[in-house]
Every structure is written in structure tokens, then in C-alpha cells.
Image (cartoon, grey):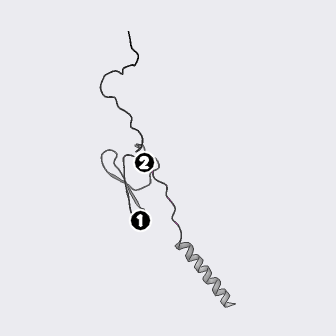
Amino acid sequence: MPLLVLIVFFNAVRTFVHTFTNKTKEVKSEPLCSECSYAHMQYGANAERVISCTYGGGVRRIKLDVLYCTDYLERNGCANPVRIGFMPLQTSSKES
């Protein structure tokens, strides 16, 4: 009987150690800054990342994962064309 108790005890300890040593980390979702054109992102070898925001000309380190930003500008989006000058748009129809 003491041998059975000892085997059950060691099995419980082995299971306890196994669950805490092989625990997988939660996968974090990507922050909003990863798709922003103002962001400067650095990725480390141990899956850490450092995010800096360059909006307004300066570089500021972001210490949290951003979910919403008022100055967000999509990195892969198309830029809006800007008209320069005072020339009116020409129409394709001919006037006679």
C-alpha cells in the first residue's frame, strides 16, 4: 500500500511540473501600429517588439499595444492625390 501511495504522489508531482513547464504563451494580437505609416517597429530575436511613433516629426516610444489612434494612417493604403495650382479641370466634351 505505501508503494501505491508513493507512485500516485510522484505521478501527481510529475503532472504538476509538466503543466507548468510546457505552458504555451498566449498569442498577442497585432497592435494598430503595425499597419500605420507613422510607426517604427523593431522585432527582437526572442519575440519581443519595440514600437516608436514618428507622428509630428519626433520619435516617441509606445509602451502599450495601441487599439485606437486618432492619427492613424494606413501604411498600404493609397494616398489621396493633391491638386496644386489654380487651373480648372478640363472636360472631355468639345464646345463649338
Q: Residue 86: within the magenta?
A: no
| Residue 7 x/y as whole percent | 64, 85
Q: Answer with mark 2 or mark 1, whichever residue precedes in sequence.
A: 2
Q: Amino acid at mark 1?
A: Asn
Few, some or many C-alpha atoms within 10 Å of disc 1 (few <14, some 14-19, many ≥20)?
Answer: few
Q: Secondary structure at mark 2?
A: helix
The answer to whether residue 9 is above or below residue 36 is below
Few, some or many C-alpha atoms within 10 Å of disc 2 (few <14, some 14-19, many ≥20)?
Answer: some
Residue at the far right: name it: 1
Who's the residue at 53% across and 71% down the image?
22
Q: Amino acid at mark 2?
A: Glu
Look at mark 1 in the image and give the residue it sits on. Answer: 46
Q: Secondary structure at mark 1?
A: loop
Compare residues 76 and 68 and report the one nearer the observer: 76
What's the mark number on residue 35?
2
Who's the residue at 35% across and 31% down the image?
82
The C terminus, quarter of image = top left
| Residue 40 x/y as whole percent | 36, 52
The answer to whether residue 25 is above or below residue 82 is below
